Image: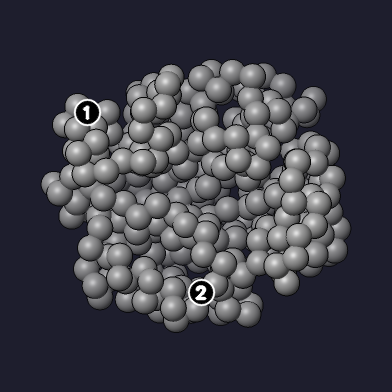
Amino acid sequence: LFSPVKFGSIELKNRIVLAPLTRNRAAPGNLPSTLAATYYSQRASGGLVITEATQATEDGQGYPDTPGLYTDAQVAAWKVVTDAVHAAGGKIVVQLWHTGRISHSVFRPDGLPPLAPSAIAPAGAVYLPGWQKADFETPREMSQADIDRVVDGWRAAAANARRAGFDGVEVHGANGYLIDQFLRDGSNKRTDGYGGPIENRVRFLKEAVAAAVAGWGSGDGVGVRLSPHNPYNDMKDSDPATTFTAAAAALKPFGLAYLHVLEPVGTSPALAPAMKAASGLPLIVNGGYGAETGAAAVAAGTI
């Protein structure tokens, strides 16, 4: 765990990674606060810091007080954070998301219901800006124009990440948010080129990753997070092994830095090894690992 490793262009002093953790402490304007600089720099002794999920576009927000990376002010505020982490000897990447149907019209600048691959409301409730709860709304099925605009958000945000001094970006394709909604057949009932067979359902992921690579300037500073088992946000899939092995394989042409899989230690069947093989990428595995289990996984070549 304490040996160095290289993920694309990102050289890590050890193999311990801070997982992305939603903090809900952004300042007005969806700016990371000065507290974020303290928080992340305190954790810079790990090999890599992955930030809390950060909106790539203004309409990507789904929770109160989460930061963005689509304005110049946000870029400047994140630069304070990255400078603090680098001063402490760490490396930091920003996780970029769009929450899709896990949102509410109150978070959208146009006041319309949130976007999703299909007009299927998830079970459960959403927190509004004042932390009161409301039922999830039925989302609007995305048009091609919606898809093109949101995908371009990953390009612009990745370019902003470079300006803000990050060491890379992570495309959030996990935990029931927009990319995951396209991947899984429980939330994607489209009949066009983005729905149906898995080769269509991975299309949105590929387009988002291609956009992030273009914005960053190369693939070797871009990672992707996937969560094949996680039911969070009312997610279901009829064949996770096929879906997520195909999703991992779709990443192979991009020359990415790493694949990050949320798969708790002891999960059966374990899909991360097959996803690693399919993608050909270095693997980060997240979920319940301690010093002994983590070291054993590294020694066995599992990660």
Q: Tag 2: residue type?
A: Pro
Question: Residue 120's x, y, as percent?
Answer: 81, 37
Label annotation for residue 35? none
Q: Tag 1: residue type?
A: Gly
Q: Residue furthest left?
A: 3
Tell me which residue sits at (49%, 38%) in the image: 226
Whether residue 89 is situated above or below residue 251 in the rendered picture: below
Quadrant location, the C terminus:
top left
**What crowding class fits label 2: few (fewer than 14 Cα within 10 Å), some (14-19), or many (20 or more)?**
many
Q: Quadrant for residue 164, please give it.
A: bottom left
- Secondary structure of the residue carrying numbered label 1: loop
Q: Which residue is mark 1?
A: 301
Question: Residue 60's x, y, as percent?
Answer: 67, 57
Whether residue 182 is situated above or below residue 25 in the rendered picture: above
Tell me which residue sits at (41%, 48%) in the image: 222
Label annotation for residue 32? 2
